[in-house]
Amino acid sequence: MTGGVARVRVPVGEDAERWITRVGCRRVLFIVHNVTSATRLLDVLPLFSGDLRVQMFATCTGSSPFLAGVPELLARAGLPVLPWEQAKDTAFDLAVSASYGGELASVQAELVILSHGAGYNKRLATPDTGHRTPDTGHPSPAPVFGLSPDWLLDDGRPLATATVLSHPEQEERLRSACPEAAPTAVLAGDPCYDRILAALPQRALFRRALGVTPGQRLIVVSSTWAPRSLFGGAGEPDGDDLLPWLLSRLSAELPADEYRTVAVLHPNIWYGHGPGQVRAWLDNARRAGLDAIPPLDGWRQALIAADCVLGDHSSVTYYAASIGTPVLLGAFPEQDLDPLSPVAALGRTAPRLVGRGGLRAQIDRVMAAHDPGRYKELAEQTSSSPGESAVLLRRLFYGLIGIAEPAGQPALLDPLPLPPHLPARRTAPVRVLTGAVGSDPPEVRVVRYAVPGDEPDPADDLGVWIDSAHTLVDEETREAGRLRIADVVVRYAAADDPRLGPPAAWTVEALDRYPYCGLVAYVDGPDRCVVRTREGDLVRLSAATAPDGRPDLCDPAAYASALHAWLADGRSLAGAVPGITVRTGATAHRVAVEPLAP
């Protein structure tokens, strides 16, 4: 036991040789500081895959204030996890860290340090280095994390055997800030960026996985951590917190069927405040259709799928700009950045969000005016060896270990996985504006806005085409009182759900439960629903498939609202058979209208 923590006996320990199966393996230790740094280590883990000569380990320094989530992440990696004190007492052939936290100088190994973001950009307070001596005679009132003697030196000597950089501009700043550590610099690209680049051809798949429908635009709201981030809200010059306004305007100004919104938040937000608290803060926006991407998986896929990233001074925003995505900066504390860094240059180039202005107009303007080559020079500074980090890093690792790289096995990173299907779900009441009802051919235009809590109905100058408005409410809404006065009530479930189905049965019960609604809809698939009118007509609404055979992913509740508007306009159900066109924004959805037996 060390400090109350049991030491690992296999595959290292005093009597490990009695119990291990493969002997003589070279030892590689991955040093985890927090979840953020661990995700970068997971990027390079596959570089040792297939090598029977290598035994990998993990440890956590325990020095970060953000330790929540680390045990779960290490368990997912499936490596033997050593207590930090045992890790310091054990000899390794190679140690890899993506942070400078903890007593790294105590590690008995050739030490490689990677960046856990897009290079080195932020100014941070002098670190708590344990036994290290940060006073090196190089005064720096606001040291740049990862490039300052405060992190790079231990008793005046370089801490790392190799300091991995992704571009020569970092090497220049390193040489200027800490010449003693310059000989350790190794240009080896950026594995995170390389995984993004390799997955760019999968953009259409990622968009469908995130529930982005034809004609929709995906808006990614991204924030790093700390008070002056977008989520922190303390970075505005006037001290005004932009976040409450932004979260409310996402649903009030962006029509539900024309925009899809997701949030990508820094792991230190999730694990610093607690996932439950973060979800509680986002509750109104989530019920209005915003989905928060889990902190470990999916954020890179969301960037690739995005039409616009509304972000701040994070690496996520910088990566988005690097792959040609329009960005709009909601916060950008220049005082927290090295003015010579590429991220600071992005802040001098990218447009800024104006609080209290029209959100949709600003987003649309940024997308319409965007030149894909606008950030070309910044993209070139992301990595001097795009697509080559796996080769360069494995060469570095095996050179330090002192053995040849695996023969006949190319150095490869894992591809970004396809995320699970995540369609937008709005449990807040939805205000539906309809108009341009035409009968030859049958057609209805629909614009829908989620209205969570006591938010006022959307006041949008959509033009004279608006003929009527009604309210649609999900039966699982928190605003149960709104169900009593809803015009359309909707339920999402499988057709064979024994608790609810079949759809014909639920629709009868729902009309009885909600005597003031004109129509109820049972959504039993991504492109279809069964509706029953107050007159008792039972109808199946099914969207026509795309030319490639894939289903239309528009929320079928929009089709139910279109039929409600058609009937409320005094038209007959027979006039909508066999099909109707539902327009959402610039997209036309061809919807089959099939009467069913009662």
Image (cartoon, rainbow, N blue to C red):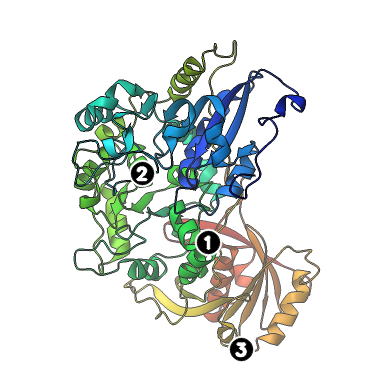
Q: Is residue 277 left or right of residue 337?
A: right
> What number of labels is visible?
3
**Residue matched to label 2:** 315
Question: Of residues 350 and 187, which is closer to you in this image?
Answer: 187
- Separation (CA) of disc 1 from disc 2: 21 Å
Rendering coords of residue 149 (x, y %)? 27, 35
In the structure shown, which secondary structural element does the residue marked by tag 1 occupy?
helix
421 or 269, which lies in front? 269
Q: Are marks 2 and 3 in contact (CB under 8 Å)?
A: no
Q: Are marks 1 and 2 in contact (CB under 8 Å)?
A: no
x%, y% of residue 166?
Answer: 35, 28
- The residue closer to the viewer here, 560 or 207, is 207
Dot 1 alpha-carbon crowd within 10 angstroms: few under 14, some 14 to 19, many 20 or more = some
Q: Mark 2 falls on what kind of element?
A: helix
Q: Earlier in the sequence, mark 3 or mark 1?
A: 1
Q: Mark 2 or mark 3: which comes first in sequence?
A: 2
Q: Is residue 415 visible?
A: no
Which amino acid type is marked by label 1?
A: Pro
Residue at x-position 55% and y-position 17%: 410
Q: Residue at x 25, y 50 (%)?
A: 336
Q: Nearer the viewer, mark 1 or mark 2?
A: 1
* Dot 3 crowding, Cα within 10 Å, few <14, some 14–19, many 20+: some
Specify the quadrant of the image occupied by residue 89: top right
Amino acid type at circle 3 is: Tyr
Closer-to-camera residue (372/138)? 138
Left or right of residue 452: residue 335: left
In the image, residue 111 above or below residue 86: above
Judge whether 192 appears above or below 72 on screen.
above
Residue picked out by circle 1: 275
The spot of residue 171 in percent (x, y) is: 27, 27
For marks 1 and 2 on the same chain, the one whose residue lies earlier in the sequence: 1
On residue 516, the disc is 3
